[in-house]
Image: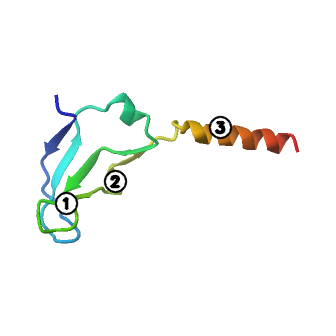
Amino acid sequence: MKKIRIVENKDEKCSRCGVLAEAREHNGLSEKTLQQSVYYTKWFNCRNQNCKTSTFMLDIYKVVNNHYKKPELVEMYEQQSFWSKNL
């Protein structure tokens, strides 16, 4: 089963060349995607082969996962908290 699917797009055009873009979205979200601090639910591919823009994303489809913290950031926050209490 494919991880992405092409969906209908009648509005979004490439900002560089103005050609109607191809819209794609996840075909179900994987555990890996859900653990990312940021991911997009929909993104676009320019259909114009001569355009320098290949893929673009819009902020309205951006998901910020505030509950997930990268392990290295968690360790850094713990160290900062320790030293702020013990100085």
Placement of 26 over or under 53, stated as above or below: above
Callout 1 crowding tier (Cα within 10 Å): few <14, some 14–19, many ≥20: some
Judging by the rendered image, the residue that carries numbered circle 2 is: 60
Q: Where does the N terminus fall, quadrant-wise?
A: top left
* Mark-to-mark CA distance, 3 and 1: 41 Å
* Mark-to-mark CA distance, 1 and 2: 12 Å
Judging by the rendered image, the residue that carries numbered circle 1 is: 12
Task: Give the image location of residue 84, x and y in percent.
Answer: 81, 44
Task: Give the image location of residue 72, x and y in percent.
Answer: 59, 40
Q: Judge depth for marks 2 and 3 and give the one in front.
A: 3
* Mark-to-mark CA distance, 2 and 3: 31 Å
Amino acid type of the residue tagged 2 in the rendering:
Ile
Q: How many marks?
A: 3
Counting residues from the start of the chain, the first of labels 2 and 3 encountered is 2
Amino acid type of the residue tagged 3 in the rendering:
Glu
- Residue 70 or residue 21, whichever sits in front: 70
Which residue occupies 66% across, 42% down? 76
- Seen in the image, is 70 located left or right of residue 44? right
Amino acid type of the residue tagged 1 in the rendering:
Glu
Judging by the rendered image, the residue that carries numbered circle 3 is: 75
Which residue occupies 20% across, 46% down? 24
Task: Give the image location of residue 17, x and y in percent.
Answer: 16, 71
Placement of 34 over or under 18, stated as above or below: above
- Seen in the image, is 1 located left or right of residue 40? left
Q: Label 3's element? A: helix
Q: Label 1's element? A: loop
Which residue occupies 16% across, 68% down? 51
Which quadrant of the figure has residue 55? Answer: bottom left
